[in-house]
Amino acid sequence: MTKPIEVRNPRTGKFDYVIIPPPPRLVVQQCKRTRRAQVRWQQLGLEGRIEALQQWKDAILSGRDRLTEALVNDTGRLSTSILEIDSFLSSIDRWCRLAPELLQESAKNTAIPFIALQQTSVPYPLVGVISPWNFPLSLSTVDTIPALLAGCAVIVKPSEITPRFVAPLITALNTVPKLHEVLTFVEGAGATGSVLIENVDLVCFTGSVATGRKVAQAAAKQFIPAFLELGGKDPAIVLESANLELATSAILWSSVVNTGQSCVSIERIYVADSIFEKFYHQLIAKAHRLELAYPTVESGEIGPIIAERQAAVISDHLLDAVEKGAVIHCGGVIEDLGGGWWCRPTVLTQVNHSMKVMTEETFGPIMPVMPFSTVGEAVSLANDSIYGLSAAVFASETEALEVAYQIDAGAISINDAGLTAIMHEGEKNAFKFSGLGQSRMGAAALKRFMRKKAILIKTNSMSDPWWFDNQE
Ligand code: NAD
């Protein structure tokens, strides 16, 4: 028997839900069963797969209230949960629309006149998806939907910190048996994730750098591809030519949305000397207008800190910054309200790169603001990080573009922040320790689930193979 895992409610602090991870033997059996079913799923063809996914979507829609309730209990926030569900449902439609063109194959001429090439692709049979707690639904499904359309079977292991949303998804899956046999959710923590990696043909992992490293090593042992989407410490650079109203609103939104618990949160802000004071005063004024979503889930904008361990990280970073001379202008404390942990939008100045708050992932609504005197200095500061997920630049478009090309990160938003959250066409890689593998956005996101296969056809009728031609 494996040990049950008690799950904490982020609003009440109470452990009011339990998951029982299956023993490793059952995970192995499930992988075998799902891999066998993949053959039927592939034979069903793309049209059949689209139909099954659409049926699942309809079933989820009819039980939407239950999914919302579960996700709210997992995360303690309401409006972001509604957005998360909307974006998941529209991602099913988007991929169903794009897949037919992306999966089209054609015969090609080759440089050798008597050899024709049919370039085909076959799906990896079984994909494992391992996801984190900050956007439980989105990050369990972002890779799952394109993988299913590509013809793979998928086993998802969501975070043990936010597992409640899975039950309503399974209820909906039960109404679509063809899909249910190739899409499974397994509950559990790291140990279950490890077993999964040993039994799948490809792994998509979203989570921390520390776990990502373990996942990469385990995948290397199995010789399977690992797509890793890891942590970030996204910088925003604000040049003198920036529209200040726009910059302060966009940066505030990007830093505090989902209480800063987003891999693409703006976590450090570099502002031109000449506008530094004006910038941070405006940021503070706007931060003061935001309220906690407490006591009711409908109130305010800032939800609770979802993972208890993250509250300790935020506290530690703030303490470290203050000890090294930082000034906190608003927020700055972790509050215990009704058993949950909360943090108001926090603006800091007098910060530098000796502080954790400028170098390590904080994952909270924390906005450290630092002045720079030259654009070159701003670029060096932005690039002075082990991370390279994304970034934002605020300036006139020409100036901003020049800076964007110099930043070592996979996606740069200009005159806004976190645009990858709403625009999925742009292909991007995670730079440095932010990840590994092909883009999870754009066309590559689906194609990475296919292995290329070249079928080489000899088209002339010469009875002797060509390599005998010149022999005496
Ligand atoms: P985590 O690394 O602690 O856990 C992620 C998942 O890995 C969980 O499901 C966990 O159970 C599982 N796991 C733990 N040990 C494992 C092992 N040895 N083998 C296999 N699986 C294992 O991360 P977290 O705290 O849940 O999530 C927060 C992190 O996720 C942050 O660093 C954040 O930046 C990152 N993140 C990245 C992106 C992105 O797209 N780059 C998106 C969201 C979150």
Image: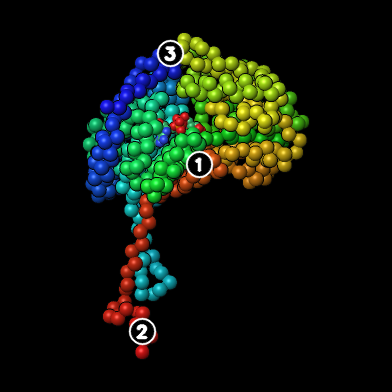
Ligand 1 neighbours mark 1 (CB distance < 8 Å): yes
Q: Mark 2 points at which residue?
A: 469
Which amino acid type is marked by label 2? Answer: Asp
**C-alpha separation, residue under disc 2 versus residue under disc 3:** 81 Å
**C-alpha separation, residue under disc 3 versus residue under disc 1:** 34 Å
Are the residues tagged 2 and 3 within 8 Å (C-beta)?
A: no
Ligand 1 neighbours mark 2 (CB distance < 8 Å): no
Q: Earlier in the sequence, mark 2 or mark 1?
A: 1
Residue at point 70%, 38% (across, down):
378
In this view, 18 is above or below 179: above
Q: On the rendering, which quadrant does ligand 1 occupy?
A: top left
Q: Where is residue 450 in the image (x, y as percent from the top left)?
A: 37, 51
Q: Earlier in the sequence, mark 3 or mark 1?
A: 3
**C-alpha separation, residue under disc 2 versus residue under disc 1:** 51 Å
Q: Mark 3 points at which residue?
A: 12
Q: Earlier in the sequence, mark 2 or mark 3?
A: 3
